[in-house]
Image (spheres, rainbow, N blue to C red):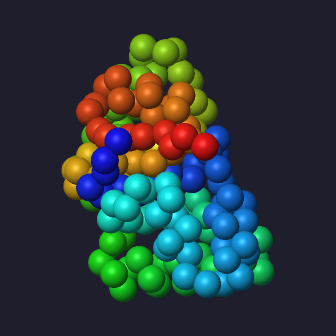
Amino acid sequence: MKLKTCTASWTSSGPGPSRYLDLYHRTAGDDIAPKLRRYTAGASLWLSSVVLEELYAGAQPRDSRIFERLERDFDKAGRMLVPNLNDWTLAGKLLARLAAKFDYEQIGQARLTNDALLAMSAARRGITIITANERDFGRLAQFHPFRWHVPVG
């Protein structure tokens, strides 16, 4: 699959902050971009503010500096993907339709909010989402088109 632009998704059911931290520590603090590119097939790499929030929320205090660097680097490069008002609206409508079809209660909808925001903001920019969360993104894609990909290996 040839990607033009992409953002990685680290959700609660995906690789999580520990996967990023492991990657960071194995590079001994060197530039992590080359390591992340193995997931992106050479495409332009973006960082979603939704993913950044999940990284900070799951980080140990000693690791927050790593995510501060990640945030600074992507912001400086102009590659931060931030949901706008329309993305929030579309995500809410998508979650309501998904809840009706799959009989999700409020807890189930809330669990998918970040994934829906990521999907709607990526769709707006034409960015492909790289994720290990095939089940949830597959369900979201039934209700609104967006590009997503599960890497092999």
Q: Which corner quadrant of the image does residue 49 belong to?
A: bottom left
Q: Residue at x 42, y 62 (%)?
A: 48
Q: Which corner quadrant of the image does residue 98 belong to?
A: top left
In the foreground, 95 or 12: 12
Q: Check the picture and name the quadrant holding the N terminus.
A: top left
- Residue 109, image x, y percentages: 51, 33
9 vs 90, left or right, is: right
Q: Check the picture and name the quadrant holding the C terminus.
A: top right
134 vs 24, left or right, is: left
Q: Tell me: residue 69, above or below residue 103.
A: below
- Residue 126, image x, y percentages: 23, 50
In the foreground, 67 or 113: 67
Q: Residue at x 77, y 71 (%)?
A: 60
116 vs 44, left or right, is: right
Q: Which corner quadrant of the image does residue 18 belong to?
A: bottom right
Q: Tell me: residue 26, above or below residue 117.
A: below
Judge whether residue 119 can be spotted in this image.
Answer: no
In the foreground, 24 or 143: 24
Q: State how many labels appear.
A: 0
- Residue 105, image x, y percentages: 56, 24
Judge whether residue 92 can be spotted in this image.
Answer: yes
Q: Residue at x 47, y 63 (%)?
A: 37
Q: Residue at x 33, y 81 (%)?
A: 77
- Residue 96, image x, y percentages: 38, 27
